[in-house]
Image: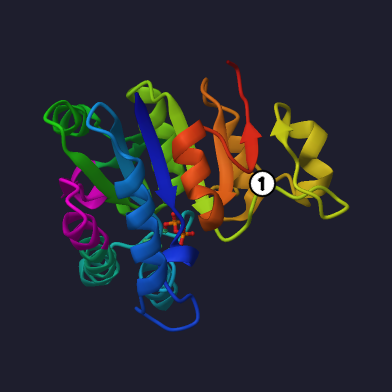
Amino acid sequence: MLTVLKLGGSIITDKDLPETVDSDAIERSVDVIAGALSSEERLVVVHGAGSFGHHYAAKHGVSSSEGTYDASAVTEIHRSMSDLSERIVDALHERGIEALPIRPLSVASRTDGDLQFPSEQIAAMLAGGFVPVTHGDPIIHDSGGVKILSGDEIVVSLASQLNADRVGLCSTVPGVFDEDGDIIETIDNYDEVAGALGESEATDVTGGMAGKVRQLLELDVPASVFDLDQLETFLADGTAGTVVRGSE
Ligand code: IPE
């Protein structure tokens, strides 16, 4: 059983204060993960940036569409993501989870718009019983220099390459809301929820629920969108919040 879980940047950091972790939320997440992970289960953790990477990306005008050739700017953004990732990895170690870091800047790239995220290293770590931890990061593109790769896109790439059984995005919202403000239980068609999601731009891949849902629909396993209160349920049952079912 392989689970790919994203911890959204907005739950593990204080979004309003630059480079400030939300220690309570990290501890809570890691406690739940430690309580749920049995020795046969395999887990990949992906995390977002929150007030770490986004702050430096904005400072240098770098986004998923705007690139840079300034190596010191890239390094500053990356260093901040590495710092955040170390906090997550350390917290996992403190709970006895054998977590190992993977840095996208060092291994991933984008060619003709397609993400190249090698999964061999991660598969080998999983086979060795480790929990790979990776994160949104600046990565090199074949045109335009270095741009931002979101954790959401990493989740989709790794879940499909590694044939994950379960996919979860844990963020600050308990699921995807419909137009009346109720949680939608299941989404299997983008057009049915496009109105509620409020926008339909295919380029929205780094933020916003529309981008998340679009990407999750590409997977052939169900993916759940839920909040920290439901992390335990997701890890126990495999689904929580809103379940996005693509081409199963
Ligand atoms: C963004 O990752 C990475 C950088 C800004 C370097 P995400 O887009 O996955 O981050 P969150 O979850 O929205 O904070």
Stretch of the chain drawn in magenta: 88-107
Q: Is residue 43 left or right of residue 213?
A: left
Mark 1 vs ligand 1: CB below 8 Å: no
Is residue 230 a member of the stretch shown in magenta? no
User: In the figure, 171 relative to 238: above or below?
Assistant: below
Q: Is residue 120 left or right of residue 45?
A: left
Specify the farthest residue to the right: 180
Specify the farthest residue to the front: 35
Q: Residue at x 18, y 48 (%)?
A: 99
Report the number of discs.
Answer: 1
Label 1 neighbour load within 10 Å: few <14, some 14-19, many 20+: many
Q: Would you say residue 142 is visible in this rendering? A: no
Q: Residue at x 50, y 40 (%)?
A: 234
Name the residue that disc number 1 marks. 210
As shown in the figure, which amino acid type bears the numbered disc 1?
Ala
Residue 225 lies in what quarter of the image? top right
Camera-nearest residue between 100 and 113: 100
Q: Residue at x 56, y 27 (%)?
A: 222
Q: Would you say residue 170 is visible in this rendering? A: yes
Is residue 94 a member of the stretch shown in magenta? yes
User: In the figure, 42 relative to 170: above or below?
Assistant: above
The percent position of residue 109, horizontal first and vertical second, equals 29, 41
Whereabouts is ligand 1, in terms of quadrant? bottom left
